[in-house]
Image: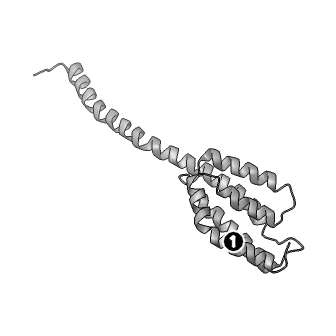
Amino acid sequence: MDTNPNRTARNLFLALLFPVVLLLIAAVSVGTPLILQYIAWQKFNAETERIETIVESWRAPPANADPVDWEFAWQTVYNALGNVCFTPETISATEFARLREDVERKNQQPITFETLEWLWWRLGHTGPHGNEYITQMQPLWEEAKQSYFESGNN
């Protein structure tokens, strides 16, 4: 039995250090992906808010549009935006930034039915999820479009 107090203290320190190091390694390996996921969600939410704010400003119909027909078309596109850009897994951060830039550019022009139609088709080019959603919901967009133009809107 070792009776040297310095050696005993050192051995006790090393015995306690090993589990602490293991716990730190485990915490970092579990925590890092969670922190990265949190950061991705923060960026995603910021992009979502910026785009939605712009598209929400398009809700007021142009002077030559029937408010009910415009609302139907606007709601269809706005709903598509929410369904296509649902999570960071449904649209890449790079594509989401491109979409926001495109929407910001489009917002510099007068907002017309063609603006809504442009966004509808642009959402289909955001990636596989966007393409699938727009393809699947195309009949609803066609109904909104038909309703808008049959009412004499132009």
Residue type for callout 1 = Glu
Q: Quadrant of the C terminus?
A: bottom right
Name the spot of residue 45 as percent of width and height, x first.
62, 55
Residue at 87 percent of width and 61 percent of height = 110
Q: How is the image coloured?
A: one colour
Q: Specify whether 127 is left or right of 113.
A: left
Q: Mark 1 highlights which residue? A: 142
Number of numbered discs present?
A: 1
Q: Residue furthest left?
A: 1
| Occupied quadrant, residue 152 | bottom right
| Near-viewer residue (144 or 5) | 144
- In the image, 106 versus 125, the foreground residue is 125
- Residue 59: image location, x then y, percent: 78, 70
Left or right, residue 32 beside residue 153 = left
**Residue occupying the point 50% across, 45% down:** 35
Up/down of 3 relative to 109, above or below? above
Q: Position of residue 89 (x, y in %)?
A: 53, 52
In this view, the residue in front, 150 or 67, is 150
Quarter placement of the N terminus? top left
The residue positioned 70% from the left and 62% from the top of the image is 120
Helix or strand or loop: what does disc 1 sit on? helix
Residue at coordinates 77% horizontally, 80% vertically from top-left? Answer: 68
Report x, y in % for residue 29: 40, 39
Q: Residues within 10 Å of mark 1 (few under 14, many from 20)?
A: few
Identify which residue, 38 or 19, lies in the foreground. 38
